[in-house]
Image (spheres, rainbow, N blue to C red):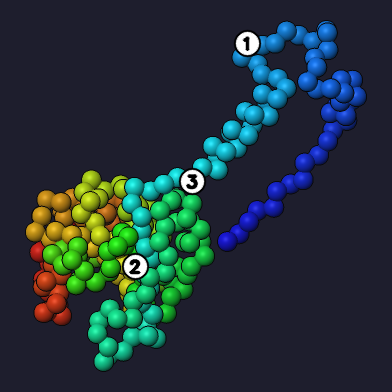
Amino acid sequence: MLVEDTPNSTITDDQISTSSTNPNPKVRDSDDDELEEGEIIGEDDSATSKASSAAVRQPHPLENSWTFWFDNPSAKSKQAAWGSSIRSIYTFSTVEEFWSVYNNIHQPSKLAVGADFYCFKEKIEPKWEDPVCANGGKWTITIIPRGKSDTRWLYTLLAMIGEQFDHGDEICGAVVNVRRKEDRISIWTKNASNEAAQVSIGKQWKEFLDYNETIGFIFHEDNKYDRNPKNKYAV
């Protein structure tokens, strides 16, 4: 994370002159103008400044807490059960925590081929077997060539954690799959049979990403038994 240098404060001749004229800033010279309406002097100035600084430092809570998950390709094994190598990384609940984590992790273009990177609502595991995901499905966009998904992945995250979707309660999370020739970004949802909600999510997602290609929605149940399931919805 880059940190910008803050210029050192300087004292001008005018400031020095003013201080020597009136060494006690809490006492106004007799020939000073009358207080302007609403003007505060002395200790009140300091209190107001401290209050303002405290307000600036207040964190900005998100409506939901979210967890980043990572499936390292080097940990995957053909003999192991699907999803057994997925590990949680960090759970965040404020805007500041999100940027602190995001700015210190690799973007999709820097991940190894075969990696899967997830961001799901807290307590929802990015697996078909999770009770919240079991009856759901996913929208997917494909990005060719691979390594060009960084911006769309970020915009997907911001729209999702910022609750920009009309049916945000339906969303479980999102995943970016890094493959040899392409990247895929998917949004997982809870209730695949709720067509109106799923179609709304798909249309809004395309608008947020300025994505013009047709995208499809697949039921998780179909994906379990068919390597190339047909789309149930398309927008």
Please, what secondary structure does the residue beneath circle 2 have? strand
Tag shown at residue 118: 2
Secondary structure at badge 1 equals: loop
User: Which percent across, then down, holds residue 23?
Assistant: 87, 23
Q: Amino acid at mark 3?
A: Pro
Number of residues whose C-alpha sits closer than 10 Å to that of mark 3, classed few (under 14), some (14–19) or many (20 or more): few
Q: Earlier in the sequence, mark 3 or mark 2?
A: 3
Q: Looking at the image, which residue is at 38% across and 70% down?
A: 88
Q: Are marks 1 and 2 in contact (CB under 8 Å)?
A: no
Mark toward the viewer: 3 or 2: 3
The label on residue 59 is: 3
Residue 130 visible at all: yes
Q: CA distance from mark 1 to mark 2?
A: 55 Å
Which amino acid does the dot numbered 2 rest on? Tyr
Disc nearer the start of the sequence (3/1): 1
Horizontal and vertical percent for residue 135? 13, 64
Of badges 3 and 1, the one in the foreground is: 3
Question: Is residue 210 shown above or below 185?
Answer: above
Q: Residues within 10 Å of mark 1 (few under 14, many from 20)?
A: few
Q: Residues within 10 Å of mark 2 (few under 14, many from 20)?
A: many
Which one is nearer the viewer's eye here, 195 or 183?
A: 195
Query: How far apart are the alpha carbons under marks 3 and 1?
Result: 33 Å
Which residue bears the numbered disc 1? 37
Quadrant of the rendered image containing residue 54: top right
Furthest residue toward bottom: 79
Q: Are marks 3 and 2 in contact (CB under 8 Å)?
A: no
> Is residue 204 visible from the viewing direction of this image?
no
Number of numbered discs on residues: 3
SS type, badge 3: loop
Marks 3 and 1: CB-CB under 8 Å? no
Whole-number angstrom distance, CA of label 3 to CA of label 2: 24 Å
Q: Residue, x 84% and y 33% (percent of image)? A: 12
